[in-house]
């Protein structure tokens, strides 16, 4: 596999996804040949189709026609002479899931911070040390070589692809040099799924070219809009004002979306308020707009929220991480109050799983826990007022359809990809997931959205399609030598621990 512009590999001569013959065994029926090719047609036949497009609707039984890389039609009993067929009976057919914030370069550090907080709170507890900022960003990140960036990003992408996440925003805070940057972009291309490459800062070493290297990156890697990988400009406000002012300015010069973290415990609130007023930055003032994606938005002021809503700012919530690492309570109730909706993100695998089912269930249960307790407290816990009717101003409970929308349609919109992905809509590109509803953890099927959100996990992800190309077939990734890639990831992990002088111990950090 070569780069999207035919460039020779500088560091990765072998195709990282070529599988050994053994990995192709046991797949059963072969997938449609040359899927995603310009002239190829196939029909996904007989599944329960949940389109996530109100103009298309949902079907208990229907077919999906894929023509090249696009969806051609969705309806019962499609007649398509000569087209290959995929038997989807007993399967739920949904759009591919979208993750709007994932630090993929950290994959070699999975579960290292299972108890970790964002910042050391000085308590001396196992939750305080090790912590994320001090260990991951200030120590491990500095030891990454370009080859570490590549294998970490590639392995994370394949893992999410296996779980049905067909689109990711890779918040890539590892741009120590142009070589690190090129390795990150190449890994996204090699993964073969839809990705928004987030060009964020590195460690600021001599030779780093953030943010001005955005011009080269845009011209070299993203000269066409007709490709799977697009670009987002990182504009982190914890950078010096002259740096984030320039990054936001470059983003608007190049017509790139802007993404930045906004976290209550990281000193971001006053800067976010300045941006909300349009007085942020140095020299040329910068402010909110519909091109901005803010991550977390925990602990922000009412002013910031009002201005964000009015300016069309998008917000990505990482429910599991926000609750676990003391970012603050996920601000879903504030968003409901303002008529806003989030997209969902996994954030860091140093601390939590990155599959869409974890994200959807966390969002659903967290919001319902808070609102249900709010309702109970409107009574007095004794008869006849132990089960009160909710007061008129009580937030509505989230439903399974709500969080499915967050995980698909909203994610694509927040990454400016909604014309291509996010729903099963004729004319959009065919990012499609087939979920096994006959499996032991789901059968019998009584509710399609209910089963997806409340019962399923990554083991139910049977087939994954990106832009018409089948990437996972009958439970196995296609053309991925996972044994070899795992060994490369383990070698990267070993290098990182050695380089920063941290002892590897499978039980020490729990």
Image (spheres, rainbow, N blue to C red):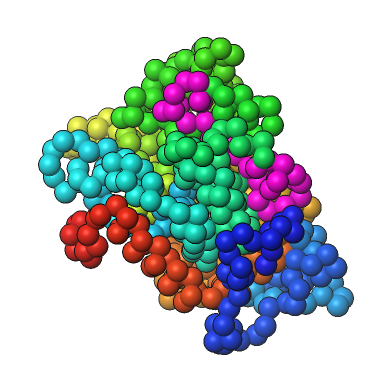
Examine the rendered structure and indicate whether residue 96 appears above or below residue 485. Answer: above
The answer, for residue 65, to whether it is visible in the render is: no
Q: Position of residue 50 (x, y in %)?
A: 62, 57
Q: Quadrant of residue 63?
A: bottom right
Q: Position of residue 179 (x, y in %)?
A: 56, 50
**Quadrant housing the N terminus:** bottom right
- Image point 84% across, 72% down: which residue? 80
Q: Position of residue 33 (x, y in %)?
A: 75, 77
- Image point 56% across, 73% down: which residue? 480
Front residue of 432/393: it is: 432
Front residue of 456/316: it is: 316
- Image point 68% across, 72% down: which residue? 46
Front residue of 430/403: it is: 430
Front residue of 122/319: it is: 122
Residue 372 is one of the magenta-drawn residues: no
The answer, for residue 22, to whether it is visible in the render is: yes
Q: Image check: 509 left or right of 133?
A: left
**Quadrant housing the C terminus:** bottom left
Q: Image check: 61 left or right of 389?
A: right
Count of residue discs:
0
- Image point 64% across, 61% down: which residue? 9
Q: Image check: 49 left or right of 176?
A: right
The residue segment tinted magenta is 217-244
Examine the rendered structure and indicate whether residue 194 appears above or below residue 137. Answer: below
Q: Quadrant of residue 51?
A: bottom right
Residue 235 is one of the magenta-drawn residues: yes
């Amino acid at each position: 596999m070569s780069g999207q512009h035919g460039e020779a590999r500088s560091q990765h001569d072998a195709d990282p996804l070529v599988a050994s013959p053994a990995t192709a065994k046991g797949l059963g029926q072969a997938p449609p040949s040359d899927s995603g090719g310009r002239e190829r047609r196939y029909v996904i036949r007989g599944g329960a189709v949940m389109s996530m497009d109100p103009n298309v609707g949902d079907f208990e039984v229907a077919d999906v026609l894929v023509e090249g890389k696009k969806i051609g039609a969705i309806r019962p009993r499609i007649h398509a002479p000569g087209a290959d067929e995929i038997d989807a009976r007993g399967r739920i057919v949904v759009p591919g899931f979208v993750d709007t914030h994932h630090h993929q370069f950290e994959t070699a550090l999975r579960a290292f911070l299972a108890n970790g907080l964002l910042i050391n709170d000085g308590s001396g507890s196992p939750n305080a040390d090790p912590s994320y900022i001090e260990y991951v960003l200030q120590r491990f990140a500095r030891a990454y070589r370009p080859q570490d960036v590549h294998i970490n990003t590639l392995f994370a992408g394949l893992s999410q692809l296996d779980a049905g996440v067909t689109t990711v925003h890779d918040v890539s805070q590892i741009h120590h040099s142009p070589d690190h940057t090129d390795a990150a972009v190449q890994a996204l291309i090699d993964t073969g799924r839809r990705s928004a490459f987030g060009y964020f800062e590195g460690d600021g070493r001599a030779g780093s070219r953030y943010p001005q290297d955005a011009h080269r990156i845009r011209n070299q890697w993203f000269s066409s809009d007709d490709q799977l990988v697009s670009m987002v400009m990182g504009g982190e406000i914890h950078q010096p004002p002259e740096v984030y002012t320039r990054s936001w300015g470059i983003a608007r010069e190049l017509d790139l979306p802007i993404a930045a973290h906004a976290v209550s415990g990281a000193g971001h609130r006053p800067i976010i308020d300045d941006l909300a007023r349009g007085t942020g930055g140095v020299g040329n003032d910068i402010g909110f707009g519909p091109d901005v994606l803010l991550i977390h938005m925990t602990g922000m002021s009412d002013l910031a929220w009002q201005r964000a809503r009015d300016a069309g700012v998008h917000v990505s919530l990482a429910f599991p991480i926000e609750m676990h690492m003391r970012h603050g309570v996920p601000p879903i109730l504030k968003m409901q109050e303002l008529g806003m909706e989030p997209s969902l993100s996994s954030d860091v695998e140093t601390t939590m799983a990155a599959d869409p089912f974890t994200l959807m269930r966390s969002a659903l249960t967290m919001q319902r826990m808070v609102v249900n307790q709010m309702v109970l407290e409107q009574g007095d816990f004794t008869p006849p007022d132990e089960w009160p009717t909710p007061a008129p101003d009580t937030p509505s409970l989230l439903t399974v359809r709500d969080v499915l929308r967050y995980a698909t349609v909203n994610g694509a919109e927040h990454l400016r990809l909604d014309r291509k992905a996010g729903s099963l809509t004729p004319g959009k590109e065919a990012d499609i997931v087939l979920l096994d509803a006959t499996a032991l953890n789901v059968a019998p099927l009584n509710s399609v959205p209910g089963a997806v959100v409340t019962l399923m996990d990554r083991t139910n992800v049977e087939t994954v399609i990106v832009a018409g190309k089948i990437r996972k077939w009958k439970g196995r990734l296609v053309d991925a030598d996972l044994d070899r890639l795992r060994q490369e990831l383990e070698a990267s992990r070993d290098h990182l621990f050695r380089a920063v002088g941290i002892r590897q111990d499978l039980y020490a950090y729990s």
